[in-house]
Image (cartoon, helix red, strand yellow):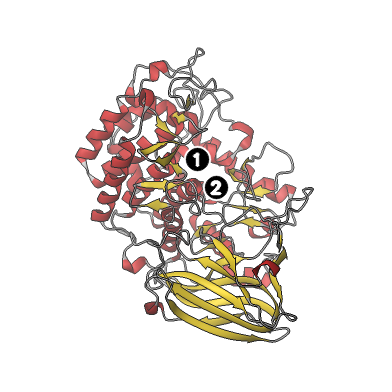
Amino acid sequence: MYFLSTCALFLGLLASSLGQSESRQVWQPVHHYFINRQPGKEAVHVAGTRRLNSFTAYTHLGTDFGFMGPAEHDIEWQQDAVCLHLGQEPEAWAGMWHSLAGLAREQQKSLNFSAAWTELLEPRYQTRVSSVRVDAHGHGRLKLEIKSDTQELLWSSVLTLEEAPEAPVVLPVSPSAFKKAKLINWIAEPGSELCIDGLFLGIETPDIPFDEYVLAASYAKLARSYDAGTGFVKDRSHLEDGAFESIASTGMFALATAVLAQPPLQMISRENALKTLNNIHRAVKALDRPRGLLPHFVRRSATGYMIHPGTEYSTMDTALYYHSLLLGAELLQDADLKTALISAMDQIDFAKLRLPAGEVSHGIEEDGRTLLTHGWSDWGGESALVMMLQNMVDEHAPRHKMARPAQAWQGTGFITEIQSLFYPDFDSDVPDALDGVKWLSARRRMLSAQKDYIQRTWPHSMAARIGLYGLSAGEGVYGDSYFVGGVDLPGQSVIHPHYVLMSAALTNPPETYELLHRLEHAGLFIPWGMVETTMVDGSLYLPMNGSLNASFETLGAYHLLVKHRSLPDAIYAASRQSRELRRAAQLFYPQAQGREPATTSASK
């Protein structure tokens, strides 16, 4: 379905110089009408309709959609297209509506066609919506319309379709005419016999180099899950505000916001960055924190935000949050925020969070009392971050060695990279003091194994042709379960592209940007960032906007950009300047000092 032709690949490789500014037109799907049907599972029909349940009830924008009209129950959606057969119904019409921002019932959210990305980004980094495209075939009349947040009709156009149109229909729109666009709809008029394959927005990118575009697009994807009214980041952008917020994503969004405010890019104003970080901290400090731990997920209740039922208070999410906010406070030189964070961290009672064997527990159950029986003993960045948080709080805490040093559990990609989003110290082959691991070599071995796995296992696949890799973790391709892959497992066919950016600081930047160009041509890197998941053959992908992987992608994109331009890495500089993070790093590197070397091993 998303086969990358030889011609498209050639054009991707001939894309304009990565170091030069250019404005381009790219296509953002509102909805590709494919069906996520799982092999071996019986297709489930939606009661009273001719539609299958695709189990992905959201658009590619991370919004909701629905059906309308007297003949809506006759809309057929059983293949990779939505079809209408109204030839025998001269009075009936049917169509679909799609929210452009948030859920349709969230009237306070809308899309500004003149500045389509998050308003936190400065005007020079904004995209513009300048056209609408519909891929349809058949015959009849198809009406397209855009409505405002008050249901006012802002624009409409009626297309008369012939049996086999030569190309998709593209209709120009004026970006300045749509400041608060809420819905984009299509309506098949009575008597029509047609199928719609997809609906798209034509996006004019800002006049910036491609490396900046990659960073801005990744941040824009992440920001779609941020609610400035509450200070939290949703786990997935298509969820209702307050339903399922992620503490880890909230923290990393704060760090991404702070680093994008740094010179020379200054994609975000320092004022807005400070406001965002303090907004986030006010929200998070109001949460219950048994033994000092933060919840994994929270939701809104009648009395405020509380742990989401069925989840835990997590040492990993607590580590991600405090690492992120400490770095953000250092970057923005917010002394008051830093003091408040240190005070909150000092309340973490690690002595009561350790299991009998000495490792730190994964956390506490929902009741706020019962210690989880699994601990951080597997080697990798997750365990390292939890241990380093413990070292920040108590540098005399017992040292606990990791199992299987230098071997990430089942070869899952993100495990070897997550620590390097925050620390420069692991860009070295100095054996660490805890397990004697040469981290840079371990990370490079993982990257090589990730690339080799696809080429060896699926040599004729779409992924192999364009050089895509990423056996990592995230939502499964069918959108109904969490999936963890890895290079140590046989027959892996599910790719999580976030690993491309997480590991990008280990690569030759021009080669990685060429890969991202190819992903763009393949429809896997769109204006609102990377897709969550794709099959190796390109036959199916999941367009979900997940905030955790969007966080990894944004921070990875930043590290890639500064390496590409030989700029000082502001996150790493802040990590070296922070007394707390230096104390944490000394668990692995006792001689870790607060200084900024000219280069790192990973960049040589």
Residue 77 image point, x, y percent: 70, 65
How many circles with numbers are drawn on the protein?
2
In the rendered view, tell whether residue 295 sits above or below residue 76: above
Q: Nearer the viewer, residue 362 or 261?
A: 362
The mark nearer the N terminus, 1 or 2, is: 1
Crowding near the residue tagged with mark 2, few <14, some 14–19, many ≥20 C-alpha atoms within 10 Å: many
The answer to whether 287 is drawn above or below residue 235 in the figure is above
Position of 35 with respect to 41 (left or right) is left
The residue identified by callout 2 is: 499
Residue to which mark 1 is pinned: 417
Image spot of residue 559 (x, y percent)? 42, 50
Residue 279 visible in rendering: yes
The image quarter containing residue 270 is bottom left
Left or right of 178: which side holds 381? right
Question: Quick check: can you spot residue 588?
Answer: no
Three-letter residue code for mark 2: Tyr
Dot 1: what SS? loop
Q: Are marks 1 and 2 in contact (CB under 8 Å)?
A: yes
Give the SS element for disc 2. helix
Q: Is residue 394 left or right of residue 153?
A: left
Q: As shown in the figure, which amino acid type bears the numbered disc 1?
A: Glu
Query: Which quarter of the figure is the N terminus placed in?
Result: bottom right
Question: What's the distance in space between the residues labelled 1 and 2, CA to CA?
Answer: 9 Å
Q: Residue furthest top?
A: 356
Residue 554 image offset from top left, x and y in percent: 44, 52
> Residue 153: x percent and y percent?
45, 78
Position of residue 587 relative to residue 304, above or below, is above
